[in-house]
Image (cartoon, helix red, strand yellow):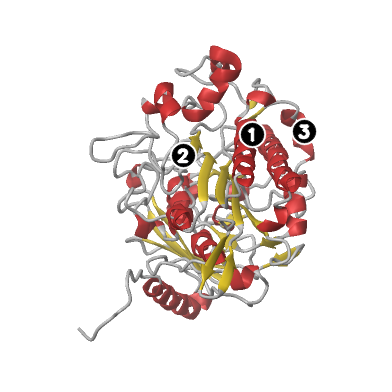
Amino acid sequence: MSPDLRLIGAFKVHRPNILLITSDQQHWNTIGKFNPEIQTPALDRLANEGTTFRRAYCPNPTCTPTRASIITGKYPSQHGAWTLGTKLSEDQPTLGQYLQRAGYRTGLIGKAHFQPLRSTPEYESIESYPILHDLEFWKRFHGPYYGFEHVELARNHTSEAHVGQHYALWLQERCGDDWRRYFSAPTGTLAPDAAHSWAIPEGLHYNTWIAERTTALIERHHDNDERFFLWASFLDPHPPYLVPGPWDRMYDPERLTVPEVAAGEHDRNPPQFALTQQAEPDFSHWNETGHAVHGHVSHIRSLEERHRIVATYYGMMSFLDKYVGVILDKLDALGIANDTIVIFTTDHGHFFGQHGLQAKGPFHYEDLLRVPLIVRYPGLVPAGALNSKLQSLTDLAPTLLHLARLDVPPDMTGRNQWPVWSGDSDGIRGHVICEFHHEPTTVHLRTYIEDRYKLTVYLREESGELYDLHDDAAELHNRWDDPAYAALKSALLLRFMWAELERSPMPMPRIAVA
């Protein structure tokens, strides 16, 4: 019997292939079908053949917490990898483990970031120095890793010195030690002032590597008549802003719309927002552990640099899009596109000038929390559709388990969104919750989002945020202290508390009176 068929009672159960493709730190509005200033033909094609969810959110706007949520179906405050510099405990059950038990072959190519760059005896990390650069170790290690029986990993964004792992092995095979001249010291010899234009040949870029290795795994599993769950995890367009030619010249900086801060928009925000607009801000009040807090820096950039950032960021997206297309074309060539559900998303959003901000930080605007989400499953997910129902990346694991005809574990707190994905439901969620917990007490905030209203609460702070996303989609007018919104704020705070109670995990059902 083919591995995708299992006898359950008198019925044969079909299980699709699952292909998850992710970018890293992609603003939700950087797909050409919806933004005429950028070209992404592969993602446009995917959107035309599937459903685009316009209100999808990350559970945390940093890498490790959300990536761990994708594979556990839990929020960061529940799975334990609560911020950058932490790790997902190896005893956490994952999507890949459940799928393997149902006969799936599982693999991840690209960025994992389930563990930190530093290792300790108590919290060991294989994604840390010096193991990152121990190529003999990576020749031997291909998993298992968090439910992925086969992994090929990379950790660097563009020219970062973190380059190593399986990507460095691949580079070594192609050009010996010559690859080091494209990367920063101490791993490589690239000049520290390299920006925007990257001399690395396209054939040595990790986009090429990810597509090549992902398509090889797809073909292997197809040839062996095996069901697969594969994650192609691209590392762009996460800064540093570097992209090889011709992508570095694809967009004229002067012809692009460059977002900027609106006059007075931070006057009614918590004080850290205004500090970002100072040349030498003092964020020491929020420094608790001694580790840097992402975003607690000056966000001031010259107008010329802001234009160049957008052009490079768009170039990185268009370059990545080409290799998304390579992977999609392989499904077509093998004749398995109709039998494979494809999900495209990212781990969190990005600022490139919106509200005067750059990159990421504890600033829960839609630009950072919303993510692109496209789902294609021919004949079962509506083609060319736009859907505005609320989605969370915590929902991916339970939804994919449902598609694999498996029970959703009771301790998964994400929702099964299949009724929405298939177009049969008006909505599963009335709200989403996003967390940001970057210091134990001083940088700890949560955001509650409904269809119209959005509320952010900070631990031990009386200041907060309240936005009306219908009347103020740009989030320029914080109504937290507006007397006209006092009754609404009170009601939202109560609904927020209900939502927190509702997402409490229940690892098992109640089976007795006592």
Estimate the spatial distance between the alpha carbons at disc 1 and disc 2, rounded to whole Å: 38 Å
Q: Which mark is residue 250?
A: 3
Tell me the quadrant of the picture where the N terminus can be found: bottom right
Foreground residue among 91 and 442: 91
Q: Position of residue 137 (x, y in %)?
A: 39, 26
Q: In terms of secondary structure, where does tag 2 sit?
A: loop
Task: Report crowding for label 3: few under 14, some 14 to 19, many 20 or more residues within 10 A (C-alpha).
Answer: some
Left or right: 501 in relation to 395: left
The residue under the point 75% across, 63% down is 383
Q: Earlier in the sequence, mark 3 or mark 1?
A: 1
Task: Report crowding for label 2: few under 14, some 14 to 19, many 20 or more residues within 10 A (C-alpha).
Answer: many
Q: In terms of secondary structure, where does tag 1 sit?
A: helix
Task: Report crowding for label 1: few under 14, some 14 to 19, many 20 or more residues within 10 A (C-alpha).
Answer: some
The residue under the point 44% across, 17% down is 186
Quadrant of the image occupied by residue 321: top right
Residue of label 1 = 212
Q: Residue lying furthest bottom in this view?
A: 513
